[in-house]
Amino acid sequence: MATATLSTTSRPGARVGTTTSAAVLSVLGTIVAIGIAATSLLIVPVALLVAFGPSLLARF
């Protein structure tokens, strides 16, 4: 049976880059989630305008 050893050398520069990219991805994910939520809030009013707009405008 063969065994392998893993080197655990610490590279501080690599960790900073990984942490920074994780933070950037987290912020971008939050922005995208807020954008999706804002878009979904607009769906109901637009659907109401499409469904009932012509009949409401015909009354005037």
Image (cartoon, rainbow, N blue to C red):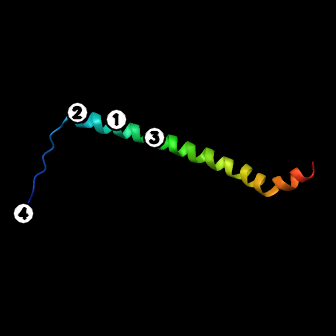
Identity, as a three-letter code, of the amino acid under mark 4:
Ala
Callout 1: 10 Å neighbours few (<14), some, many (20+)?
few
Q: Under tag 4, what secondary structure?
A: loop
As measured in the structure, the alpha-carbon distance from the residue carrying label 3 to the one carrying label 2 is 23 Å
Residue identifier under label 3: 28
Taking the image as shown, residue 40 lies to the left or right of residue 10, namely: right
Callout 4: 10 Å neighbours few (<14), some, many (20+)?
few
Residue at x-position 6% and y-position 63%: 2
Indicate which disc, 3 or 2, sits on the residue closer to the N terminus: 2
Identity, as a three-letter code, of the amino acid under mark 3:
Leu
Quarter that holds the N terminus: bottom left
Residue identifier under label 4: 2
Indicate which disc, 2 or 1, sits on the residue closer to the N terminus: 2
Indicate whether 48 appears above or below 14: below
As measured in the structure, the alpha-carbon distance from the residue carrying label 2 to the one carrying label 4 is 33 Å
Residue 29's tag is none
Taking the image as shown, residue 53 lies to the left or right of residue 23, namely: right
Q: Under tag 1, what secondary structure?
A: helix
Q: Under tag 3, what secondary structure?
A: helix
Residue identifier under label 2: 13
Indicate which disc, 1 or 4, sits on the residue closer to the N terminus: 4
Indicate which disc, 3 or 4, sits on the residue closer to the N terminus: 4
As measured in the structure, the alpha-carbon distance from the residue carrying label 3 to the one carrying label 1 is 12 Å
In the image, farthest residue toward the left: 2
Indicate which disc, 3 or 1, sits on the residue closer to the N terminus: 1
Residue at x-position 18% and y-position 37%: 10
Which of discs 2 and 4 lies nearer the camera? The answer is 2
